[in-house]
Image (tube, rainbow, N blue to C red):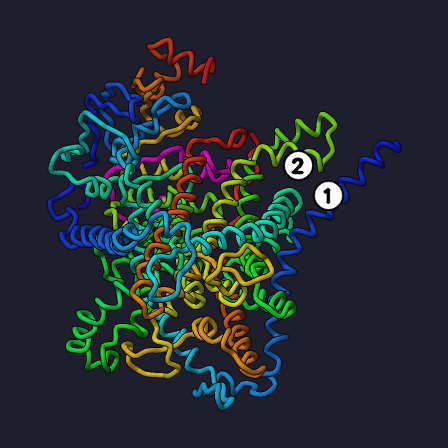
């Protein structure tokens, strides 16, 4: 009797220790929120909601308006998604439905590589390879043929919102494609067979038997890509131009929430300045949390996203 | 009037494994033909070769001839898509499209083939659902309920309606009732009785009593070979082959 | 009548065209995506390979204008920071993974799992701000420790997920064999279950490594970077990605050249790690798991 009671104690301790580890994840999230709110309280009190509608960012005169960063973040993310969503979906559909078996491993390794390249290396490549191409060939072309839209005006610097959007797109494609692949694979085979048996061509089978069923999950993958684009820092910082202004043209330099943090955090003199920056961080944190949570829920609804079951072997 | 199926020297492989050996059969038009045999004997593979579904799996191969009426199924000029358009298939596990309404499910095959006329679609949908004995149960919620919200038996009848809507000549059924409860099974069997007047039906079943109830002809498969093919009555009362007799009397499988 | 298949019933050319167009579009997408991948690797090798030499790997930076010099301190710094990060991230990550797989098959576990996923999506620069607030503000100076804390936090969700998945792959029968022998639950988990899943967990840790090794943003105001050789955890320290960033945005050609070299070293480390992981996984060295 005593022996059994004695041996129960370590089990209980172990269980509590593991629970503590599990809880640490939640504690960390709470800690992040706490620190962000704590360090931005000065700015929160000073500016209130006007912080997010103010267009002027003038640290010298203690004027802090975050709208240019919000604008830059949203716009660069939209450009990124416009490019990345069709590409990511295309890669996913190809990999799951059209790819010959022997190429599949190589293709999935390639997308894994794309996802593994650090942001700073994307930025390095973008500065020295992408930007000159944009400046010399792409942007003048865009200005000439699509300038009437108002989206492509101003000197072709090369750096700017368009460059940032393109680099973001490259970085976001692997996320969209790998998650969409997961979602498409979760559609049961007999849905595909139902469409084929009705006399559908392969594309029709994909459309009716696969994509239609996976709609929610695909949306989740796209939103997850958005979440990544919103918070991406280094590559964007290196090519966006770092000018806190709102311009209609995609060729203009801009600034994102993450970039201003990267650039100005260590230069922040004065508590208000620092506090304003942390407030931008807080906003970014909250937005990405909401976006990511929404995306995960959507993906889960298609894949019933629990991890591998315990094998009853 | 009806369309028969002629199978000659049909062989099929999964990778290196041969699943069907030299199958030859003539399936009578406007009758129901049952395919029976123990698990793994090739009955599903056989039926899936008729509408060229077998080749949709990776590393599969088929050789031989199959004719459905005048159509040479494996002929050079016959696209697989066209074959499947003329052959309806109902699967073991009901697979209605969950993201579509009942109406859209039935109309799916027609829409794929270019039918857009709403009046015509309405007509065909109603006719198909009536033929599948499902119309009365769903006529008020055609566009409101999704295909997956029905019970198992109803889902299977929906799949039958979907297959019938494109007006096939032949209906292939791969163990259509094995995932259903006895009452739904009974309904499906009644349905087959009705349908065989107008369609050529091939039904795979592991339930011998079902074969006896529903089909005029029966083929017994074993290890990828067609052992015996005859009137159902003869197969079950006086089989020619000992192996058939062993299977019927439950000695294996 | 519907009976005889007629020529009219063949598939329309439009449907066939759509089918081909769809295939072409998918192939085009794949090519467009592989293009930047190839471009990046080609430029990395082209511009970086010439500058990687013994001097680069063993010397510290020299003042601008003075040739030679390398990124030895940055490589060391990355090692130091990753070591600190692992000390934080690995135990907590494995612990959380054990919790989720052994004690977390319930709504509470679901909530933690969800939280870990959310934590994974937090932008790395925000983690940097938090580490700044927790460590730098308190110590009143930048340090390798702060950088390690930031990266450690980032490692946790990856390791947690990997640990959980690997533990779940261990068959129930293995656990039951141990419990049936009278081994206590905690012993079973540690000595039997974890040991069986060990190879898989190690690969998960390596993947987490590969991910945070390239992170720059969280180090910007924690480790801060340095031009000097140092392994002191209480001082600012250089790190490979940080150095690459600083050199890349500088106006000096010599530093640009070194940035490419550093980038090549970094990508080789990361790709190497991933390749090893894949090798372990494909060789099925994860014995005992399904």
Q: Mark 2 lies on which chain?
A: C
State which quarter of the image contains the C terminus of chain B: top left
State the image quarter where residue A174 is shown: bottom left
Residue C117 in view in this figure = no
Q: Name the residue under label 2.
A: C190
Q: Which of A48 and C229 lies nearest the eye of the viewer?
A: C229
State the image quarter where residue C32 is shown: bottom left
The span picked out in magenta is B160-188
Q: In this view, does C252 lie to the left or right of C18?
A: right
- Co-location on one chain, circles 2 and 1: no
Q: Which of A120 and C24 lies nearest the eye of the viewer?
A: A120
Residue C39, position in %: x, y? 25, 55
Q: Name the residue under label 1.
A: A14
Q: In this view, does C81 lie to the left or right of C254?
A: right
Q: Residue furthest right?
A: A2
Count of labels shown?
2
Q: In the structure shown, which secondary structural element does the residue marked by tag 2 occupy?
A: helix
Residue C83, position in %: x, y? 56, 50
Q: In the structure shown, which secondary structural element does the residue marked by tag 1 occupy?
A: helix
Q: Which chain carries label 1?
A: A
Q: Does the magenta stretch include residue B225?
A: no
Q: How crowded is mark 2: few (under 14 residues within 10 Å), some or many (20 or more)?
A: few
Q: Residue furthest front?
A: C66
Q: Which numbered dot is residue A266?
A: none
Q: Residue furthest top?
A: B242
Q: Which of A38 and B212 lies nearest the eye of the viewer?
A: A38
């Amino acid at each position: 009797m005593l022996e059994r009671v004695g041996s129960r104690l370590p089990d209980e301790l172990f269980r509590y220790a593991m629970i503590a580890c599990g809880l640490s994840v939640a504690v960390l999230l709470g800690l992040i929120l706490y620190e962000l709110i704590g360090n931005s309280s000065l700015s929160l009190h000073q500016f209130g909601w006007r912080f997010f509608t103010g267009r002027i960012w003038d640290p010298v005169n203690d004027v802090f308006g975050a709208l240019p960063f919000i604008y830059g973040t949203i716009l660069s993310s939209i450009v990124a998604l416009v490019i990345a969503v069709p590409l990511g979906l295309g890669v996913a559909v190809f990999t799951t439905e059209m790819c010959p078996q022997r190429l599949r491993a190589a293709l999935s390794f390639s997308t894994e590589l794309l996802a593994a390249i650090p942001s700073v290396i994307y930025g390095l490549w973008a500065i020295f390879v992408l930007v000159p191409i944009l400046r010399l060939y792409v942007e003048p072309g865009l200005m000439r043929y699509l300038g009437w839209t108002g989206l492509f005006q101003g000197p072709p610097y090369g750096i700017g919102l368009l460059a940032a959007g393109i680099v973001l797109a490259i970085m976001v494609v692997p996320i969209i494609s790998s998650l969409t692949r997961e979602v498409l694979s979760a559609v049961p085979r007999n849905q595909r067979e139902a469409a084929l048996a009705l006399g559908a061509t392969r594309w029709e089978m994909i459309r009716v038997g696969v994509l239609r069923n996976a709609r929610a999950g695909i949306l989740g993958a796209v939103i997850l890509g958005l979440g990544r684009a919103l918070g991406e820092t280094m590559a964007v910082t290196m090519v966006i131009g770092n000018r806190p202004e709102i311009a209609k043209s995609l060729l203009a330099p801009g600034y994102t929430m993450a970039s201003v943090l990267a650039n100005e955090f260590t230069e922040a003199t004065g508590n208000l300045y620092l506090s304003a920056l942390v407030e931008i961080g807080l906003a970014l944190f909250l937005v990405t949390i909401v976006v990511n949570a929404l995306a995960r829920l959507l993906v889960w609804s298609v894949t019933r996203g629990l991890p591998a079951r315990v094998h009853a072997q | 009037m009806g369309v028969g199926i002629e199978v000659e020297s049909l062989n099929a492989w999964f990778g290196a494994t041969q699943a069907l050996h030299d199958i030859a059969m003539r399936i009578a038009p406007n009758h129901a033909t049952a395919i029976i045999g123990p698990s793994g004997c090739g009955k599903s593979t056989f039926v899936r070769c008729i509408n060229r579904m077998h080749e949709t799996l990776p590393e599969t191969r088929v050789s031989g001839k199959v004719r459905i009426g005048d159509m040479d199924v494996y002929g050079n000029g016959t696209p697989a898509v066209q074959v499947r358009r003329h052959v309806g298939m109902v699967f073991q596990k009901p697979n209605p499209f969950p993201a579509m309404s009942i109406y859209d499910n039935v109309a799916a095959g027609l829409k794929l083939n270019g039918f857009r006329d709403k009046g015509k679609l309405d007509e065909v949908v109603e006719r198909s659902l009536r033929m599948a004995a499902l119309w009365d149960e769903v006529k008020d919620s055609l566009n409101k309920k999704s295909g997956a919200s029905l019970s198992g038996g109803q889902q299977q009848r929906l799949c039958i309606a979907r297959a019938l809507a494109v007006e096939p000549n032949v209906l292939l059924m791969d163990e259509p009732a094995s995932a259903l409860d006895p009452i739904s099974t009974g309904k499906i069997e009644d349905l087959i009785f009705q349908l065989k007047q107008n369609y050529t039906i091939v039904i795979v079943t592991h339930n011998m009593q079902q074969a006896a109830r529903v089909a005029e002809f029966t083929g017994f498969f074993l290890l990828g070979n067609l052992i015996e093919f005859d009137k159902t009555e003869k197969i079950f009362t006086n089989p020619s082959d000992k192996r058939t007799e062993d299977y019927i009397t439950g000695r294996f499988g | 009548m519907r009976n005889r298949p007629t020529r009219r019933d063949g598939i329309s050319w439009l449907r066939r065209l759509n089918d081909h167009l769809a295939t072409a579009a998918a192939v085009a997408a794949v090519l467009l995506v592989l293009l930047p991948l190839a471009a990046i690797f080609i430029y990395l090798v082209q511009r970086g390979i010439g500058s990687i030499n013994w001097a680069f790997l063993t010397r510290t930076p020299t003042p601008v204008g003075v040739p030679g010099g390398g990124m030895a301190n940055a490589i060391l710094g990355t090692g130091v920071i990753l070591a600190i990060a692992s000390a934080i991230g690995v135990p907590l990550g494995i612990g959380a993974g054990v919790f989720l797989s052994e004690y977390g098959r319930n709504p509470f576990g679901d909530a933690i799992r969800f939280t870990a996923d959310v934590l994974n999506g937090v932008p790395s620069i925000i983690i940097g701000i938090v580490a700044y607030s927790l460590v730098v503000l308190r110590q009143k100076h930048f340090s390798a420790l702060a950088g390690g804390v930031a990266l450690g936090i980032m490692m946790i969700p990856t390791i947690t997920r990997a640990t959980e998945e690997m533990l779940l792959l261990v068959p129930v029968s293995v656990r039951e064999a141990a419990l049936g022998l009278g081994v206590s639950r905690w012993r079973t988990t540690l000595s039997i279950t974890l040991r069986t899943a060990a190879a898989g967990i190690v690969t998960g840790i390596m993947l987490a490594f590969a991910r945070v090794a390239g992170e720059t943003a969280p180090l910007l105001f924690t480790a801060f970077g340095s031009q000097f050789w140092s392994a002191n955890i209480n001082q600012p320290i250089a790190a490979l990605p940080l150095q690459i960033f600083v050199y890349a945005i500088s106006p000096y050609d010599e530093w640009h050249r070194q940035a490419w070299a550093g980038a090549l070293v970094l990508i080789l480390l990361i790709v190497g790690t991933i390749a090893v992981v894949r090798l372990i996984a494909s060789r099925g060295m994860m014995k005992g798991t399904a």
